[in-house]
Structure formats: C-alpha cells, structure tokens
Amino acid sequence: MDRSLMDGIPPDELADFGRWRDRVRGTNISEKTLLATDYLNHFNEIVMLIEMIPDMPDMLEECRIWQPKSYAEHFRDSGFSDKELAIEAYGHVPSKFRRPFEDTIVQAHQVIAHTLERIGTDIDSGDPDKLRMDCQTSVAMIHRIIQVANGIIHGTAHVMEQGEIDLYLQNG
C-alpha cells in the first residue's frame, strides 16, 4: 500500500479499507479511495444543459428538471457495470476521502442551484450578454468543483475553500 495514501486514515478504518481495495481492484472504482468517477457524469449532464442556455433559453426548463442525486441514487439509476459494488464500497470509503468528497458535492449542488436562479433572472431581464457571461462563469465554477471531486476520487486533490464558493454565490 502507498504510505502517503494511508496517512490520515484512522487505524480503525485501515483493515477494512485494505479489504475493500482488493474487492474493487480491476473495476472502474478507484482502488485509492473506493470512489468511482462515473458519479461525476451526473454533474456533467447539468453542465451541458447550462452551456446550451445562451443560445436556447428554453433549456432552462430542462435544467430545472435536473435534480441532485446522492452517490447511491446515481448508481442505482445508472447503467454502470459495477453499480452494486460502487454503492456497497461507498459505505467503506475512509473518512479521509469521504468527508471532503461529500463537502465538494454539497458545494456543487449549492452552485448549481444558485446558477439556475441567476440564469432565470437573466432570462427574465432580457439581457443576452449577461446571460451568456453568467452561464460561462457558472460553468467554469462547476467544472472547477468537478475537477476537485475527480481529484478526491483519485486520491490526489484538496478541497475548495468554502470561502471561494461563498464569494461566487454572493457575486451572482
């Protein structure tokens, strides 16, 4: 086992983590964290919809249909080949990875909700330039959060500071 990967994992989680790393080996679930990047497809879907809004404002209704899903909900509804294993493994993700991952997902949901509100206001005000700019800014922030989540999944990233998210939410 990679020693730096093990740093910060409480001793009571280490043995279980080792067993689960063996169980997910050879799947699309990260051996380093027991998390799967497929979950991020849920966020990529809303990003694609938001990117269409400047040219097709009626896509806002499609965006509003999109709903946040928990990790387990996403996999239950997906065609992911190892979805049952992904759901089960999630309960064994060490807190070192699980807490920052869950915090990052909460941030993504906050930013998406704020984005949809702001875009709705932009559409109502009839300013296509502001709409385009707000969509671009929002998509950039969501992409950044997705990158952070992806790094956590692969055991390499640090979380975004809540202050950075708060600043984004206040400036919109």
Image (spheres, grey):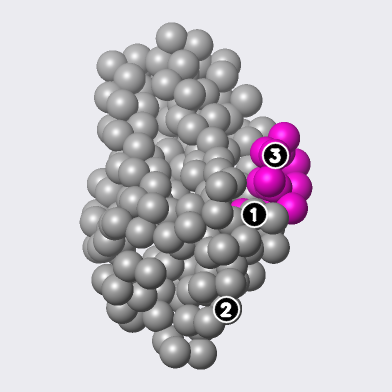
For the residue pair 108 and 122, the one nearer the viewer reads as: 108
Q: Is residue 40 above or below residue 61?
A: below
Measuring from the top left, give residue 99's x and y in whole percent.
Answer: 45, 71
* Badge 2 or badge 1: first in the primary sequence: 2
Which residue has dot 3 on it?
81
Measuring from the top left, give residue 103's x and y in whole percent.
Answer: 43, 64
Which residue has dot 1 on it?
86
Task: Please report the residue visible at 52 percent of the width from the left and 73 percent of the height from the top.
Answer: 18
- Which of the two marks, 2 or 1, is nearer to us in this view? 2
Task: Please report the residue visible at 27 percent of the width from the left and 61 percent of the height from the top.
Answer: 158
Numbered disc 3: secondary structure: loop
**Are the two marked residues, 3 and 1, in contact with CB atoms closer than 8 angstroms?**
no
For the residue pair 40 and 9, the one nearer the viewer reads as: 9
* Badge 3 or badge 1: first in the primary sequence: 3
* Badge 2 or badge 3: first in the primary sequence: 2
Crowd around label 1: few <14 · some 14–19 · many ≥20 (10 Å): many
Task: Please report the residue visible at 63 percent of the width from the left and 36 percent of the height from the top.
Answer: 66
Q: Is residue 125 visible?
A: no
For the residue pair 9 and 59, the one nearer the viewer reads as: 9
Disc sitting over residue 16 in the figure: 2
Q: Which residues are magenta?
A: 71-84
